[in-house]
Amino acid sequence: MKNTENNKQKKVKVRGTGTYDPETSEFGFKPFEEGPSSQANVKNCKGGGKSWETVGSDPSLMLSLKCKKSSPDAYAELSKQFSQLTKDIKTEKPVELPSEQRVVNEQGLECWLNEGKQEMTFMGTIDLSRHSRDWQAEVLRQVQLVVRRLPACESFNKVINNLKKGGKNYV
């Protein structure tokens, strides 16, 4: 009995242009010219991430991260893919995670939380050309905005609850 698996041809996807003539009901296909791949050194990782280098006059390093929207911890999955895909890249100095996290960023107001120091920093911008007479009301509006937004921030609630329990060092 002959091995017919060796004689089978693989299906190959071909890019091209399809045309349909409604008068004659004919369909035609013209494949594109073959050329070199625009991607080199392609690496895939678990979870769907991919890295590659573009070829051409101005080569670039490209990364693509992928995660399901329903994932319980999307940040962790994307971070893991990023680490896997960039492990071969050498940095001049070690990358440190930021010590502060922005917890409010809207309408001219930013609020940063440093969990380690248990400090919060407010930065507000007021356009005095628009609020020259009511700048005090604008400052009050920004403070009220912070008071409304912070209870929704988990990291802020952790710091506050730790302080309420008498904890001095946040872990």
Image (cartoon, grey):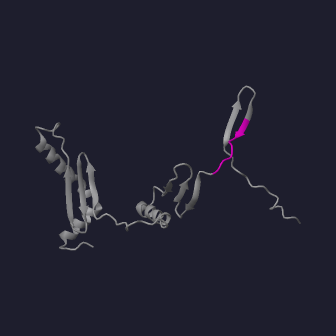
Residue 26, quarter of picture = top right
- The residue closer to the viewer here, 35 or 74, is 35
- Residue 167 visible, this angle: no
Residue 98, quarter of picture = bottom left
Which residue is located at x 12 percent, y 42 percent? 135
Q: Position of residue 132 (x, y in %)?
A: 12, 38
- Residue 151 visible, this angle: yes
Residue 6, placed above or below residue 55: below
If the image is split into quadrants, where does the N terminus sit?
A: bottom right
- The residue closer to the viewer here, 56 or 23, is 56
Describe residue 137's horizontal placement relative to residue 108 as left or right.
Answer: left
Which residue is located at x 19 percent, y 69 percent? 163
Residue 115, placed above or below residue 33: below
Residue 161, placed above or below residue 102: below
Q: Position of residue 110 (x, y in %)?
A: 24, 52
Residue 19 falls within the magenta-colored stretch: no
If the image is split into quadrants, where does the C terminus sit?
A: bottom left
Point out the residue furthest to the right here: 1
Magenta residues (range): 28-36
- The residue closer to the viewer here, 15 or 58, is 58
Residue 133, quarter of picture = top left
Q: Position of residue 138 (x, y in %)?
A: 15, 44
Which residue is located at x 19 percent, y 72 percent? 165
Describe residue 134's horizontal placement relative to residue 29 as left or right.
Answer: left
Q: Position of residue 90 (x, y in %)?
A: 45, 66
Point out the residue furthest to the front here: 57
